[in-house]
Image: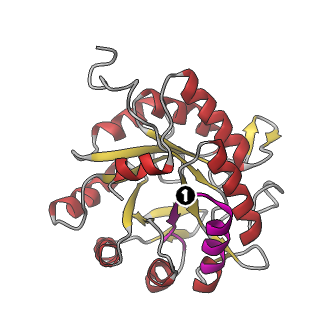
Amino acid sequence: MVYEGFQDYYDKKMILSVATTGGLHGKEANPNLPTQPEEVAEDVAACEEAGASIVHLHARDENHEDTKSVDRFQELRDAIDERCDDIIVNFTTGGGYPREERIKPILDVEPRPDIATIDVGPLNFGKDTVRNYSRGQNEEFAEKMAEHGVKPELEIFHPGHFTEVNHLVEEGFLEKPYWCTLILGMQTGTIPHPRNLINLVDNLPDDAEWQCLAVGRHQLPLTTMGILLGGHVRVGLEDNVYYKKGELAESNEQLVKRTARIANELQRPIATPDEARDILGL
């Protein structure tokens, strides 16, 4: 036995997700962050070639500002479908918009995304902003995603959010396997310490698949730890604009390549998009 509880470590395929853009910082944080549909699609194609099997997407308008425009999400989807082979598409439902605006791209873009996020609980942003993600919203989004053949990704920012995850599981809103993202380093999220990642993993429901997301300088050490724990990982310029201290990342591809290289050195095989679909039951 290699690791107790992780007997299949060397055989289990690792899903590598890339979050290309995000909805907060822009080119002022890193001029290499892609914002326009063709720019994003070119970056995603390079990431797919480097080993990414899922792309997590936010849309930006012509002025590089975050938007929930269905037309803009459609442009983004079309550009990626044209440039990429088979990458799994994941749309965000996050952001400070009315909830009907946040779910609308998931329901109206064709083809619909394979996956869409549900932020399962509230979170502080900045000095005076609170993102109010409620239980009622979680249920509504999960129901609508099920009706439209979209798999929810449960974004878990701190241990208290497991109460909401367990509610969705127990009330039958989700299908196995449950796809969970463990997020460390956000303002009122989990403090980015290795022991806290282990605690999050220990609180996952049975039949969950999980990926580690850590922001800023914490991305590299904690996603590497996620690999060692037998999980999946997410990297990208949405979460971290630097390659190392004082050096901006050249591209999302650069971050994906590094993570793929580390996974290979740690003898975790990387999942293709088809293999990721099998793992997640898509």
Q: Quadrant of the N terminus?
A: top left
Residue located 71% across and 63% down the image: 40
Residue 114, visible in the rendered structure = yes
Q: From what the image shows, is residue 164 above or below residue 36?
A: above
Q: Position of residue 224 (x, y in %)?
A: 54, 31
Is disc 1 surrounded by few (<14), some (14 to 19) or many (20+) residues within 10 Å? some
Q: Is residue 9 magenta?
A: no
In the picture, measured across the screen, residue 115 lies left or right of residue 254, that is: left
In the picture, measured across the screen, residue 15 lies left or right of residue 220, that is: left
Residue type at mark 1? Asp
**Between residues 193 and 204, which one lies in front from this camera angle?**
204
- Residue lying at the far top of the rendered structure: 1
Q: Position of residue 98 (x, y in %)?
A: 48, 84
Q: Quadrant of the C terminus?
A: bottom left
Q: From what the image shows, is residue 21 above or below residue 16?
A: below
Q: Position of residue 7 (x, y in %)?
A: 29, 22
Residue located 80% across and 61% down the image: 27
Residue located 24% across and 55% down the image: 176
- Tell me where the magenta segment starts and ends, as one range: 74-95
Q: From what the image shows, is residue 11 above or below residue 135?
A: above
Name the residue that disc number 1 marks.
86
- The colour mode here is secondary structure
Residue located 55% across and 60% down the image: 56
Q: Is residue 80 magenta?
A: yes
**Between residues 268 and 189, which one lies in front from this camera angle?**
268
Give residue 214's quadrant in the image.
Answer: top right
Q: From what the image shows, is residue 112 above or below residue 197?
A: below
Q: Secondary structure at mark 1?
A: loop
Q: Position of residue 187 (x, y in %)?
A: 54, 53
Q: How many marks?
A: 1
